[in-house]
Structure formats: structure tokens, C-alpha cells
Amino acid sequence: MKRLLSWIITCAMASHGLSQLNNAIFNGTQHFLFREHRLSPKDSMMDLTRRKPGFGTQVLSYLKNDEFNEFHNPGKTLIGSQIGIGFKQYLERPNAYVYIGGLLNYPYGGDKIQAYPLIQFTKSTKHSALVVGSLHGTTRHRLFEALYAYDYALTQPMEYGLQYLGRNRGLSWDIWLDWRQMAERESSQQEIISFGLNSSIALNKASSRHRWSIPISSLLFHKGGEFLKVMQPVQNQWNASIGLRGDLFQNRFRVESVFMGSMDFSPKLLHRFKDGHAWLTNIRWNMNLHHTLALSHYYAEEFYAPLGPNLYQSEQIGFPNRESRFRNFLHLRYQYNHTLVPKKASLDFRVEPIYHLESQKVAFSMGVYLKYVIGREIY
């Protein structure tokens, strides 16, 4: 037992938490929709790779409105469509393949269409996969939302770099290097890199009626600026989490409590707080395949996660003078998922009221997402 606890603590310094809601609508495949409700011990982590080759197009239309009305977190509205076109080709054996294609994101009302190439090589085994190029990123990392905003699936839907993920003997992991921005000396554009580890340690058998696990994550965010024409300040931020999760009554209920920490170890402190901490407690009820209800309590003190949403931060990202040292709120979420056409079209609707315990103010978020596929699903 002592050896097990020692190993768990060691892993906490390295890094799988699942975001508060089922984000399968963003995850690139209808196949994963509701899949977390019916996992079996025989499921392979790499079921996504067991597909026939072919060409396909998929579209995600989205509307997300946040009415937060705080000085450091005013909220925003995202509305638009994404279209992905690609071809999947196996390389000699079914466990190695490439994706070639692209993804266009058009935020309605804007004057620019964001273009992302889809270039991915994947080599998989029964329990793991190595990915090079376009990563299985954003919500597929399955981090807690306080650490990684699921809005990135709408605003920056593609990540590039290296990734190693899998599951074996009660341990699941996702390890990735995301090269978010390259350095350009003449324009003094900084390089931006994130390195993440996300893991879950099972405490009993996956076939158990009540499954218990320990989610652990670590996320390092780096901005370089040493060799630019105009020197830019170097930034290094680290976030980590460790908690306890119970999936009860064969995934009907989920209860989890997680501790999160933040630390800034940049050469010069550029933010209001050098380190901080937060507690997140979730209770989620998967009522059936269509309806999910979740209640969360979040408390934070001087907490900062550069890739998380402003709702969970003690300062506004990019504006350190806009701060709220303490965060303390209840977050109620209702989610409706419906497969409109099997394996072709699905709908996701969310209503998320928030009650700030200290200010006694109410905030609100809602979202509607429609996804449909023409031909074979890609990525």
C-alpha cells in the first residue's frame, strides 16, 4: 500500500481527468458519442482506428453564448461553422494509417476564414498509439475544463505536434507536445509550446458496478522570446491536478473531487499571482443516453491556468490587472444529446447557469451544436 501511494504521488508531479460534460460532439467522431456510458473491459483504446479507408466530409455548426458580466470575465458569443474534408489511407497494415485533408472554421460575422491542414500519421497497437502531425487535441485530451477550455474546439480546433496515448492494466494516458506557434525573429513573434500529460489510475476492475479511479494531470505552458529581434519576456506556467473519481451504478452517476494547482516559474513574474490552488467537486447524473445533469462547486485562490477559460481564473487571460483573487461558485449544467441520423448527424444542447456565492450574482452560458457527416467520417 505504501508503495502504491508513493507511486501515485510521483505520478501527480507528472500527469486523466474528464471534463465536466460529455464533449463527444467535438471529438471528431460520432463513434464516441455516449461511448463512455458503455465501456467494457474488452474495449480497445484504439477503436477509432478500426475503420475502413475512404473520403469524407464533416460539418460542425455551433452557437455558444456566455453572459458572465464580470470585470475580468465579461463573457462572449461564438457562432459559426467548421467543415473538415479528408482522406484516410492505411499503410500496408491496418494499424498504421495517414489522414490528409483540411479543416475550415468560419466565425459568422468575421472577415477571415481560419484554415487548418489535416496531416496525421498514426501507428497503433492493441493498447496504445503514436500520433505525429495533427493531434487528437482540444476536448479529446479530456482535461478538466478549469485547465483547458473546451472553447478551443471552436476557436482553435487543431493542434500539431507529437502524441502518445493508450490504456493498459487499469492505467490510461495521453501524453502530448503541442507546438502552438512558431518563433519568427524578424516580427518578434514568440514561440508557444504546451506539454501535457493526462492519466487515470483504476483502483478496481473496469467490470465493477462501482468503479473508482485517481485522475492525474500536468500541463506546462511556455512562451519563448530569447532570440527575437525585439526581446520578449519568457513565460513558463505549470498546472497540475489530482483527485478521486467514482463511476457508480455502471456509469449512471459520477462523483469526483479534484485539487488543482498553478505555478509561474518565469524568469520575471508577469502575472498577479505566482502560485495558487483550486478545488473542483462534480456530481454528474447520466439520466439516459440523451439527458445529463451535473452540479459542480468550484473554489479557487490566486489560481491561473493559461489555457483555461476566464470563468475559473483569478485574473483575466492577457489582462493581469483585471483580477478576482477568489473564485467561489456553483455551476449547474444540463446537456441534451441526440443522434438525429445514426452515424451521420447529432445534436448537442447545453444550458449552464452559474451562481457566485460571494457576490450572490447569477451568470449564464448556453450552447447549441449540430454535427453531420457526408461520406465517411474523418479524423
Image (spheres, grey):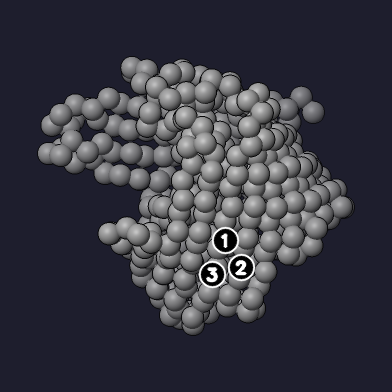
- The quadrant in which the N terminus is found is top right
Nearest-to-viewer mark from 2 and 1: 1
Give the CA distance from mark 2 to mark 1.
8 Å
- For this rendering, which residue is in front, 288 or 6? 288
Q: Residue at x 48, y 66 (%)?
A: 61
Write down the residue under mark 1.
368
Counting residues from the N terminus, which is met first, the one under dot 2 or under dot 1?
2
- Which type of secondary structure does the marked residue at label 1 adopt? strand
- For this rendering, which residue is in front, 31 or 145? 145
Q: Which image quadrant for residue 283?
A: top right
Q: Could you tell me the amino acid type at mark 3?
A: Lys
Find residue 39 and name its label.
Answer: none
Counting residues from the N terminus, which is met first, the one under dot 2 or under dot 3?
2
Q: Residue at x 33, y 33 (%)?
A: 223
Would residue 168 be visible to someone looking at this image? no
Q: For label 3, count other residues whose C-alpha is less than 10 Å away and answer few (under 14), some (14-19) or many (20+).
A: many
Q: Pointers 2 and 1 in contact (CB under 8 A)?
A: yes
- For this rendering, which residue is in front, 233 or 359? 359
Write down the residue under mark 2.
347
Q: Pointers 2 and 3 in contact (CB under 8 A)?
A: yes
Q: Could you tell me the amino acid type at mark 2?
A: Leu
Placement of 211 over or under 129, stated as above or below? above
Q: For label 2, count other residues whose C-alpha is less than 10 Å away and answer few (under 14), some (14-19) or many (20+).
A: some
